Image (cartoon, rainbow, N blue to C red):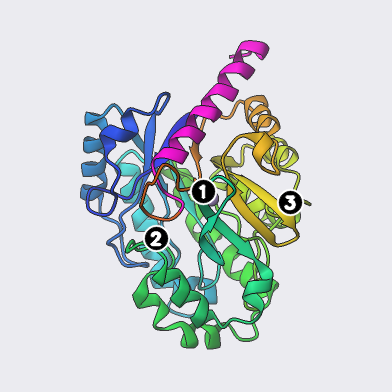
């Protein structure tokens, strides 16, 4: 596996490449071009620039998160073909810059959703949390406003202020669309894009819905094993793969993550892994916690062992961390707790490797 760390770039991240390089066991960064509007073509040059900067700090840059999918593609509008062409060109350009893995999601309107970006834990740290009771009485606009107000001045991917201005219009466009309708639009997109990804050596990994449940009545199609089966069947190619995000899938205790990893790993469909622990209090009431198994609901050893067993050689990154030691930063993306998480995962991996000694 390749241990990686999500980085928002020179302009938008308060964490430096040098700090990332100082995390033991760190191999690379996961990056993106955050200033390119969704739907536009990603040029090669700025990707090469990130690659060069990363290399100065002994870090590889082979993984993108995310090239976002334009809403017209998810909606299946006639204009989608133009945006699919752009997506294809972005993949070709990414390949020219040495990119191997591209994460994306197919969530309507919202990217991830939380009801609290700084929930205090017992030890004074804060974390991201979700409680469906709190969503019940809210409009999407209320939710968007809260997230913007609590993001410590950082723009959170999927919650860009300009997109949120169009919220009412976007909801109108999705009226009447069910899961099958959205699934058809994903299949249309994948049938066009995956052959090109395959040709240029890029593995695509769709990110699960976060949380994996319908929010505000919008359809969600990446929630569980059955959904992943349907997506895998849309295009028979290793380039049509998954980002296994343990915090997203794991917030539903019905999802058996080690089983999902082994099953789709055997099909060579696991392309990217986000490791995060969550504490699930009751269905759809959960908060994120430190990575260590004993602290949350997920058995990180079993998850790491499943990845080891499928000989996973793609990128793993510690996902959202808590805010600890007085750090201020982008919610979920502080330095300290993610660094601790990476170190914990490396420790698990080393121990499994030493005990099993397969490779
Ligand atoms: Mn994730």
Per the model, the C-alpha gap separating discs 3 and 1 is 36 Å
* N-terminal label among 2 and 3: 2
* N-terminal label among 1 and 2: 2
Q: Nearer the viewer, mark 2 or mark 3?
A: 3
Indicate the quadrant where residue 99 lies. Answer: top left
Q: Which residue is mark 3?
A: 225
Q: Which mark is residue 87?
A: 2
Q: Residue furthest right?
A: 254
Magenta run includes residue 136: no
Per the model, the C-alpha gap separating discs 1 and 2 is 43 Å
309 and 196: which is toward the camera: 309
**Which residue is found at the position 70% from the left and 31% from the top?**
302
Q: Residues within 10 Å of mark 3 (few under 14, many from 20)?
A: some
Label 3 element class: helix
Principal secondary structure, stretch drawn in magenta: helix
Q: Residues within 10 Å of mark 2 (few under 14, many from 20)?
A: many
Q: Which residue is mark 1?
A: 124
For residue 72, say whether it is visible.
no
Q: Is residue 131 above or below residue 198?
A: below
Q: Is residue 52 above or below residue 305?
A: below
User: Magenta segment range?
Assistant: 332-359
Q: Residues within 10 Å of mark 1 (few under 14, many from 20)?
A: few
Q: Nearer the viewer, mark 3 or mark 1?
A: 1
Label 2 element class: helix
Per the model, the C-alpha gap separating discs 2 and 3 is 27 Å
Q: Is residue 53 above or below residue 58?
A: below
Q: Nearer the viewer, mark 1 or mark 2?
A: 1
Indicate the quadrant where residue 286 lies. Answer: bottom right
Q: Is residue 275 left or right of residue 214?
A: left
């Amino acid at each position: 596996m390749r241990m990686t760390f999500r980085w928002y770039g020179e302009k938008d991240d308060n964490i430096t490449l040098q700090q990332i390089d100082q995390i033991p066991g760190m191999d690379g960064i996961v990056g993106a071009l955050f200033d390119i509007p969704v739907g536009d073509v990603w040029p090669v040059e700025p990707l090469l620039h990130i690659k060069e900067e990363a290399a100065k700090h002994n870090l590889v840059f082979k993984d993108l998160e995310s090239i976002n999918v334009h809403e017209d593609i998810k909606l299946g509008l006639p204009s989608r073909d133009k945006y699919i062409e752009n997506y294809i060109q972005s993949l070709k350009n990414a390949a020219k810059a040495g990119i191997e893995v591209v994460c994306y999601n197919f969530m309507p309107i919202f990217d991830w959703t939380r009801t609290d970006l700084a929930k205090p834990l017992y030890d004074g740290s804060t974390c991201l949390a979700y409680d469906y009771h709190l969503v019940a009485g809210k409009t999407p606009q209320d939710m968007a406003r809260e997230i913007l107000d609590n993001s410590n001045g950082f723009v959170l991917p999927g919650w860009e202020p300009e997109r949120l201005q169009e919220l009412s219009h976007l909801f109108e466009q999705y009226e009447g669309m069910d899961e099958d309708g959205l699934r058809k639009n994903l299949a249309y997109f994948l049938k066009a894009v995956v052959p090109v990804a395959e040709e240029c050596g890029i593995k695509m990994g769709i990110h699960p819905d976060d949380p994996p449940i319908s929010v505000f009545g919008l359809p969600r199609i990446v929630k569980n094993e059955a959904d992943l089966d349907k997506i895998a069947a849309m295009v028979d190619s290793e380039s049509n793969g998954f980002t296994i995000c343990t915090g997203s899938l794991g917030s539903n205790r019905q999802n058996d993550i080690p089983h999902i990893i082994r099953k789709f790993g055997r099909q060579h469909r696991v392309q990217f892994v986000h490791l995060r622990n969550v504490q699930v209090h009751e269905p759809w009431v959960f908060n994120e916690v430190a990575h260590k198994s004993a602290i949350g609901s997920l058995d990180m050893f079993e998850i790491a062992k499943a990845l080891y067993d499928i000989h996973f050689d793609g990128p793993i990154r510690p996902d959202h961390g808590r805010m600890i030691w007085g750090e201020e930063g982008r919610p979920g993306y502080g330095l300290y707790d993610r660094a601790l998480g990476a170190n914990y995962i490396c420790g698990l991996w080393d121990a499994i490797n030493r005990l099993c000694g397969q490779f």
